[in-house]
C-alpha cells in the first residue's frame, strides 16, 4: 500500500481558531480523505505551536502560565477540528517531551556539522510574525510587512545557523524540481527572494528576554528560536529521529523507519519563506531529505479588506457551521477559493455556494430517490445502469486530476457538473412520462438504475469535502458505507432499498 504523509502548519496557541486556520486544515482534511478513499495509508498531521514570545506575552496578559494557556488553546483547536469533521491522525504540541527531544537533537546535529556560530545581532523584530525583518522590508513606516503590526529594535547575542551556505543548493533544488513549490507564482516569489544574498538565520534568543522556549543544549541562557522549534514538528511526528538514541549522531546517522519525508506541507502564502527557505536549509544542514512538495495557498479576505482582529471582521467558521452545517462550510471554502489564489469571503457568495448544494446535488438526490420509491416501491430495479457511463468516467477523470494536481476547486466543480448532468438526464428522460406507459417499463428501470449508480459515484466524489452528507446519501441508497473508488465499477446496486428522507441541504430561513 502506498503511503501519504501530509501536514498543516501548527497554529499559534495564542489565538482562537478562525477561518484562515480552518481553510488550511480543511484543505488538508479533504486531501487526506481523498487519499484514503484511493486506498493509501495516510498520516495527516496538525497541531499547535506553543513556544515563543507571542505565547509568553499572551499568557502574561491573561494572567496565566504559558502552559495553562497552551493547554486551553490546544483543546480549543482540537474541539474546532472535531466540529469541522477533521480526520487528522496526529495532533502534535511543541511542548511534548518527544518533540523537545527531537529539537534538541537537531540543534546538536547542526552544531556538530559545523553550521552554528555565535554573534551579536541587531535587527527589527516582529512579535506578530515571530521573525526579524530587514530595514528594506519594514519600509519607512517601520511595520511588519505581512500583517502591518509593530516591529521592535533588538540588539543581543544570538546563535546563528549558516543558512547562506545552502543558498546555491536550495536554488538548484527549486530549479531542478519545478513542481516542488506550487503554485508556480509562489515558486517564482521564492526564487526572487533567493536572488539576493541569503542571510544567516538567528536560531536563539536570550532567556532573559524570552524564557518560554526550548533551551539550547550547549547554552542554557539561550532558548531556541520558535520557528526552528515549530518547523521541526514535522520530523518529530514522522518518527524518523529517536531523541534518546545513543552515540554522536543523535539519531540522525541511523534514521528510524518513518514517514519522513513528508509528501506535502500545506500552508498559507504568509509563511512560505519559513517553509521553503528556512526549513529545507535546516534539513540540509542536518542531512535529512527534503519534503516532496510545498503548497502555499492564498489568503481569505473579507469583502476587499484583510481579515484581522483589530478590524473586528474575523469570520468564525463555527458560527457558519451552526447555521448551515459542517459540510456547507467545507464546500464553500474548497469550491470558492481557486487553490493557491486569494479569495474574498462574502455572505452572498456563501449563500450562492450553499444554494448550489441544495439546488443541484440535493435536488438530484431527492427526485431520484423519490422516483425509485414512487415507481418501484423503493427497490432499485435490476437493469443496466450505464446510460451516463461516459459522462461519469469523464467527471471522475477531471475530479482525480483536480485532487491529485492540487486544484481542488476544479475537482469539485467536476463533481457538481456530474450532478448537473444527471439532473439534465432526468429532464430528458422524463421518467414520469415513462411511468405512464407500461410498455416502457424497461426504459424506466434503466433510467432509475442509472440515477442510483450516479448517486453512488457522487457520494464517493463528495465524501472528502462533505463527509456527513455523503454518508447520509450512502445510507439513503441502502449502502453500508460510501463506496471507495475501486469499488465503484463492480458495485451491485440492483435490489438496494432506498429511502427519501428530508432534504440533504434544507433551505435556511432568516437570511
Ligand atoms: N505557528 C505558525 C506556523 C508554524 S508551522 C511550522 C503560524 N501559525 S498561525 O496560527 O498564524 O496560522 C497559520 C496558518 O493560518 C497559515 O497557513 C496561514 O496562512 C493561515 N491563515 C491565517 N489567516 C489566514 C487568512 N485570512 N486566510 C487564509 N489563511 C490564513 O503561522
Image (cartoon, rainbow, N blue to C red):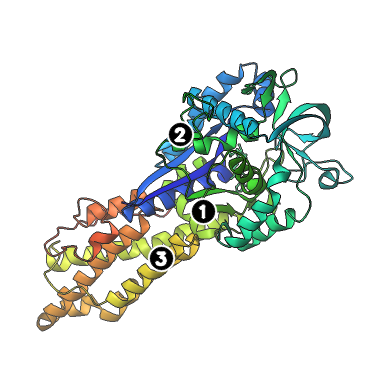
Give the mark nearest the N terminus, 3 or 2: 2
Q: Residue 189, how many percent across, how many down?
A: 69, 57
Residue situated in front as seen by the camera: 102 or 445 = 102
Residue 342 lies, with reference to residue 88, above or below; the image says below
Q: Are marks 1 and 2 in contact (CB under 8 Å)?
A: no
Neighbours of disc 1 within 10 Å: few (<14), some (14-19), many (20+): many
Residue 165 figure quarter: top right
The x and y percentages for residue 452 are 23, 65
- For numbered disc 2, what is the local secondary structure? strand
At mark 3, the secondary structure is: helix
Q: How many marks?
A: 3
Q: Nearer the viewer, residue 37 or 504?
A: 37
Label 3 to label 2, Cα distance in Å? Answer: 29 Å
Graded by Cα atoms within 10 Å as few (under 14), some (14 to 19) or many (20 or more), the crowding at tag 2 reads some
Name the disc covering residue 399, or none. Answer: 3
Write down the residue under mark 1.
333
Residue 105 left/right relative to 365: right
- Residue found 20% across the figure and 73% down from its top: 385
Q: Do the residues bearing badges 3 and 2 touch, measured as CB atoms within 8 Å?
A: no
Residue 14 at least partly seen: no
Residue of label 2: 91
Percent coordinates x, y for residue 37 in the rendering: 32, 54
Task: Give the camera-side residue of 494 and 163.
Answer: 163
Task: Name which quarter of the figure residue 423 lies in.
Answer: bottom left
The mark nearer the N terminus, 1 or 3, is 1
Find ligand 1 in the image and state its quadrant: top right
Amino acid at each position: 500500500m502506498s503511503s501519504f504523509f501530509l501536514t498543516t502548519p501548527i497554529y499559534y496557541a495564542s489565538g482562537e481558531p478562525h477561518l484562515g486556520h480552518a481553510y488550511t486544515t480543511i484543505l488538508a482534511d479533504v486531501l487526506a480523505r481523498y487519499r484514503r478513499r484511493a486506498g493509501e495509508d495516510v498520516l495527516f498531521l496538525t497541531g499547535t505551536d506553543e513556544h515563543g514570545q507571542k505565547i509568553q506575552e499572551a499568557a502574561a496578559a491573561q494572567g496565566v502560565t504559558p502552559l495553562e494557556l497552551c493547554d486551553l488553546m490546544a483543546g480549543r483547536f482540537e474541539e474546532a477540528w472535531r466540529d469541522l469533521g477533521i480526520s487528522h491522525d496526529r495532533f502534535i504540541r511543541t511542548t511534548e517531551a518527544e518533540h523537545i527531544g527531537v529539537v534538541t537533537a537537531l540543534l546538536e546535529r547542526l552544531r556538530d556539522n559545523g553550521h552554528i556560530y555565535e554573534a551579536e545581532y541587531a535587527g527589527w523584530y516582529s512579535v506578530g510574525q515571530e521573525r526579524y525583518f530587514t530595514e528594506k522590508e519594514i519600509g519607512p513606516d517601520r511595520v511588519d510587512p505581512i500583517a502591518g503590526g509593530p516591529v521592535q529594535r533588538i540588539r543581543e547575542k544570538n546563535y546563528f545557523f549558516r543558512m547562506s551556505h545552502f543558498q546555491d543548493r536550495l536554488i538548484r533544488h527549486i530549479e531542478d524540481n519545478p513542481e516542488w513549490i506550487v503554485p508556480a507564482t509562489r515558486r517564482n516569489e521564492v526564487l526572487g527572494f533567493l536572488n539576493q544574498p541569503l542571510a544567516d538565520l538567528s536560531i536563539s534568543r536570550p532567556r532573559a528576554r524570552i524564557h518560554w522556549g526550548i533551551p539550547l543544549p550547549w547554552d542554557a541562557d539561550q532558548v531556541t528560536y520558535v520557528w526552528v522549534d515549530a518547523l521541526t514538528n514535522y520530523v518529530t511526528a514522522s518518527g524518523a529521529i529517536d531523541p534518546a538514541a545513543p552515540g554522536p549522531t543523535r539519531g540522525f546517522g541511523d534514521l528510524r523507519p518513518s514517514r519522513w519525508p513528508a509528501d506535502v506541507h500545506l500552508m498559507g502564502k504568509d509563511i512560505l519563506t519559513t517553509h521553503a527557505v528556512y526549513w529545507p536549509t535546516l534539513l540540509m544542514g542536518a542531512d535529512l531529505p527534503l519534503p516532496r512538495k510545498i503548497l502555499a495557498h492564498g489568503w481569505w479576505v473579507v469583502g476587499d479588506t484583510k481579515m484581522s482582529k483589530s478590524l473586528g471582521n474575523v469570520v468564525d467558521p463555527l458560527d457558519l457551521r451552526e447555521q448551515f452545517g459542517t459540510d456547507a462550510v467545507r464546500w464553500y471554502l474548497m469550491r470558492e477559493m481557486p487553490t493557491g489564489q486569494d479569495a474574498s469571503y462574502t455572505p452572498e457568495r456563501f449563500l450562492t455556494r450553499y444554494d448550489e448544494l441544495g439546488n443541484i446535488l440535493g435536488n438530484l438526490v431527492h427526485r431520484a430517490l423519490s422516483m425509485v420509491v414512487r415507481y418501484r416501491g423503493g427497490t432499485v430495479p435490476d437493469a443496466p445502469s450505464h446510460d451516463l457511463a461516459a459522462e461519469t468516467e469523464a467527471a471522475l477523470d477531471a475530479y482525480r486530476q483536480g485532487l491529485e494536481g492540487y486544484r481542488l476547486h476544479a475537482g469539485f466543480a467536476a463533481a457538481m457538473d456530474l450532478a448537473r448532468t444527471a439532473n439534465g438526464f432526468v429532464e430528458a428522460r422524463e421518467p414520469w412520462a415513462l411511468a405512464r406507459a407500461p410498455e416502457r417499463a424497461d426504459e424506466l428501470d434503466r433510467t432509475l438504475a442509472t440515477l442510483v449508480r450516479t448517486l453512488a459515484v457522487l457520494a464517493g466524489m463528495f465524501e472528502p469535502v462533505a463527509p456527513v452528507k455523503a454518508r447520509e446519501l450512502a445510507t439513503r441508497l441502502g449502502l453500508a458505507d460510501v463506496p471507495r473508488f475501486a469499488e465503484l465499477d463492480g458495485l451491485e446496486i440492483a435490489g438496494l432499498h432506498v429511502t427519501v428522507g428530508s432534504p440533504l441541504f434544507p433551505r435556511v430561513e432568516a437570511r
